Image (cartoon, grey):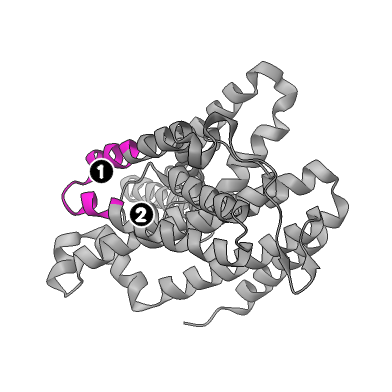
Amino acid sequence: MSLSKSHIAFLAAGLIALLVLPTMLKTYGLYLLTLWLVYIIAALGLNLTVGYAGLKSLCHAGFMGIGAYTVAILMKAGVSFWFAMPGAIVLCFLFGLLIGFPALRVQLHYLGFATLGFNLLLMLFFRNEEWLTGGTFGIQNIKRPELFGLSFSGNLAFYYLVVFLMVVSAAALAYLLRSPWGRAFAALRDNPIRAESTGVNITAYTLMSFAIGAAYAGLAGALFAPLVNFIEPAPFGLANSLLFLLMVVVGGSGRFYGPVLGSAIALLLPEYLRFAKDWYLAVFGFAVVVMMIWLPGGLLSIKERLQLSKAKRAAQTSDSKAEAL
């Protein structure tokens, strides 16, 4: 299935914007832009699990924590980032397989509670195993990588590295979703019983949806650690798992570009609402509630919502004319 010319032009314009925009930003703005790209990577993985496979997950921040701590610990031990990052991705993939097993027996909110418990276990591990994770003191001075003498220690250089990895990971997911695997995930979401009757291996695709989603979170965590240069348990708790879920739902669950828009709303909108001081979180929460009431399918469903409203008005007009006759 090939992309339309308008779609290719849109992607090209977006990529050019990502390459040019950081040159106009100050240090904090560049940090937020980089963090947004990291969150996009994580949210893409959660969108596969929640949006395309139709499973419930409240432990995505925990997977991101596994990736971040793996990279930080290995780099402190002298391992290169370029070996530590794949190690973090593989470890998260394996943990994703592990947490996928409850999904074979429980569904809906029961699965949500199971994944929530896993996130809490990870938080306890990050906080209490000081010999490995540093506990509440965390791990400091996480260096940014180098490659063939090229250093990514500068903010702009590291930003372009994150852009490259985000584009590669997004392209890989797009290819996966256009393959028979993507159709199998959609079938699993829509009707598992019917999908199994058509030959879809429910067990395999359930486990893989969690594993691949977790691997994306591991990549995001591997980039988050050198971005902030310091990690401790707080960013990987339940609050951030809910934030990732919010990114997927607000943008449009099961829509490829949903996490891109949703992560921008969840991360950047609160920053622009800080003029409200102590009320900015309340304003943000109210805005999200209003969006979900009016657009339960996410912001990317607005076109469908308008088309549906137009069709309803046309039907009402037709009925009125018929009654008049």
Q: Residue at x 41, y 37 (%)?
A: 125
Using the image, determine if residue 77 lies above or below residue 241: below
- In the rendering, which numbered label is found on residue 95? 2
Q: Which residues are magenta?
A: 99-117
Q: Residue 283: give x, y in percent of width and height.
A: 60, 24
- In the rendering, which numbered label is found on residue 111? 1
Using the image, determine if residue 112 lies above or below residue 5: above
Three-letter amino acid code of the residue under disc 1: Leu
Within 10 Å of disc 2 (Cα), the crowding (few <14, some 14-19, many 20+) is: some
Residue 101 colored magenta? Answer: yes
**Secondary structure, magenta segment, majority class:** helix
Three-letter amino acid code of the residue under disc 2: Phe
Q: Secondary structure at mark 2?
A: helix
In primary-sequence order, the first of circles 2 and 1 is: 2
Q: Residue 76: give x, y in percent of width and height.
A: 62, 51
Front residue (pair 189, 161): 161
Q: Secondary structure at mark 1?
A: helix
